[in-house]
Amino acid sequence: MAIARGVVPFARKARWFNVPNTQNTGRAARMWQQYRKTFIPIQALILTLCVVMWFFRVDFRSISTLFVVMQACSLYGASMGARWSRRIVGRAETLPLSRR
C-alpha cells in the first residue's frame, strides 16, 4: 500500500496541538475584550442568583448546574456580543442608502 508523496500518516491537524500565540488577535481577542468588559456585572448576577436559590433551600446540585450553565453562557454571550458590536461598528461607516 503506497502513501502519496508529501502526506504524513497520522498527522495531527487539530489546532490545540499548536503552540499558542502570545498575542491574541482577531476574533478571540475581541471576545475576551468583551468578556472583560462585562465580567463584574455578570459574575455578580450569577452569584446573586445562586445565593437566592440557596436561601430558598434549593438542592445544591441544581444550584451548581445553574452556576456552570450560566458561566458557559456568559462566554457564549461575550463571543456573540463581540460579533454584534463589530457588525454595528462596520455598519456605522457606510451610508444608510448604499447598495449592498
Image: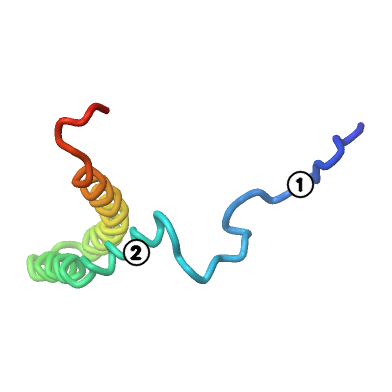
Q: What element carries label 2?
A: helix
Q: Is residue 43 left or right of residue 7?
A: left
Q: Which amino acid does label 1 sit on?
A: Phe
The image quadrant where one finds the N terminus is top right
Task: Say above or below: 69 vs 94.
Answer: below
| Kind of residue sitting beneath label 2 | Trp
Residue where numbered disc 1 is placed: 10
Q: Quadrant of residue 36?
A: bottom left
Q: Report x, y in % for residue 72.
A: 31, 57
Count of all numbered marks drawn on residues in the image: 2
Which one is in front, 27 or 57?
27
**Residue 32, disc:** 2
User: Which residue shows up at 15% across the image and 62% down it?
Assistant: 58
**Residue 12, how many percent across, how many down?**
69, 51
| Circle 2 crowding by C-alpha within 10 Å: few under 14, some 14–19, many from 20 | some
Residue 18 as seen in the image, left or right of residue 92: right
Report the residue at 9% width, 67% height from top: 52
- Measure the alpha-carbon separation of dots 1 and 2: 33 Å
**Image quarter hosting the C terminus:** top left
21 above or below 96? below
The residue at 13%/65% (across/down) is: 49
Q: Is residue 57 left or right of residue 25?
A: left
Could you tell which of marks 1 and 2 lies nearer the N-terminus?
Answer: 1
Query: What is the basis of the colouring in this image?
Result: rainbow
